[in-house]
Image (cartoon, rainbow, N blue to C red):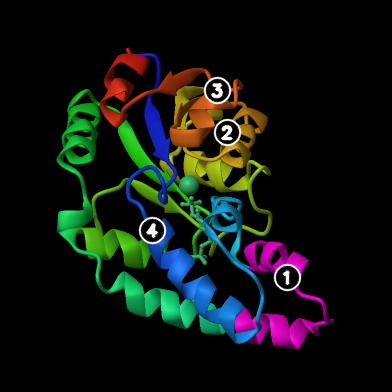
Amino acid sequence: MKYKAVIFDLDGVICHTDKYHYQAWKTIADELSIPFDETINNRLRGVSRMESFEIILEKYPGEMSQEEKVAYTEKKNAVYKELLKNMSPKDLSPEVWETLEKLRGAGLKLAIGSSSKNARFILGQLGLGTYFDAISDGNNISRSKPDPEVFLKAAEYLSEAPADCLVVEDAKAGVEAAKAGGMDCAAIGDAAFCGIADYDLSTFSDLCRAVR
Ligand code: B16
Ligand code: MG
């Protein structure tokens, strides 16, 4: 094995919560009469909650205080968490599950490195609440991707050197974060076209080849 551990981004890699983020942000954007569509939503992938709101506010003509921004992001999160209750173990694809099991069976440690403060809740909904060896998420970082903090913390929680970890990401900022942390990165989805990852995966199970 080329690595001792694999660190997975959550949204866009292990599961897909885009539609729930979209619906929740759309509620807020509509309330503020801000135009919001799938193209803007795509820019929010891997970006923290407040940074996401700042992107949405690019189309807001007025000024907004920090207190109001906090209130609106909290409101968005309440709507989002309600929608996340629709998730269940059925939202975990068999391909993802079988690949995780193969990697674990090959002796690799498995961790999560996600910007989301809802990562543990989402993992619980998927039936993976106690599955990973470590979870580094939006609650234990002060700098978001492309800063490597979330992945360096995951490596630290696993007691592994960054060079022994492979990160799996779906966002360019996440691939940049992995590389900045001295880790190899396998990109999936849109990130597989950014040209800076060590492996470009066309499907999740390609990971089994990447780690050998
Ligand atoms: P929350 P990831 C990211 O998760 C999402 O891709 C991004 O759209 C979201 O804004 C961010 O988490 C923060 O999420 O509001 O739940 O804290 O891709 O890093 O797993
Ligand atoms: Mg992601």
Q: Nearer the viewer, residue 82 or 114?
A: 82
Secondary structure state at the residue bearing disc 2: helix
- Residue that mark 4 sits on: 17
Q: Position of residue 11 (x, y in %)?
A: 42, 51
Which numbered disc flags the more N-terminal residue, 3 or 1? Answer: 1
Membership of 122 in magenta stretch: no
Is residue 183 at least partly visible in the picture?
no
**Label 3, label 1: how many angstroms apart (C-alpha)?**
31 Å
Span colored in magenta: 50-73
- Residue 196, picture quadrant: top right
- Residue that mark 3 sits on: 197
User: Mark 1 belongs to which amino acid?
Assistant: Leu
User: Mark 3 belongs to which amino acid?
Assistant: Ala
Dots 4, 2 in contact, CB < 8 A: no
- Residue that mark 2 sits on: 175
Which of the two marks, 1 or 2, is nearer to us in this view?
1
Secondary structure state at the residue bearing disc 4: loop
Which numbered disc flags the more N-terminal residue, 4 or 2? Answer: 4
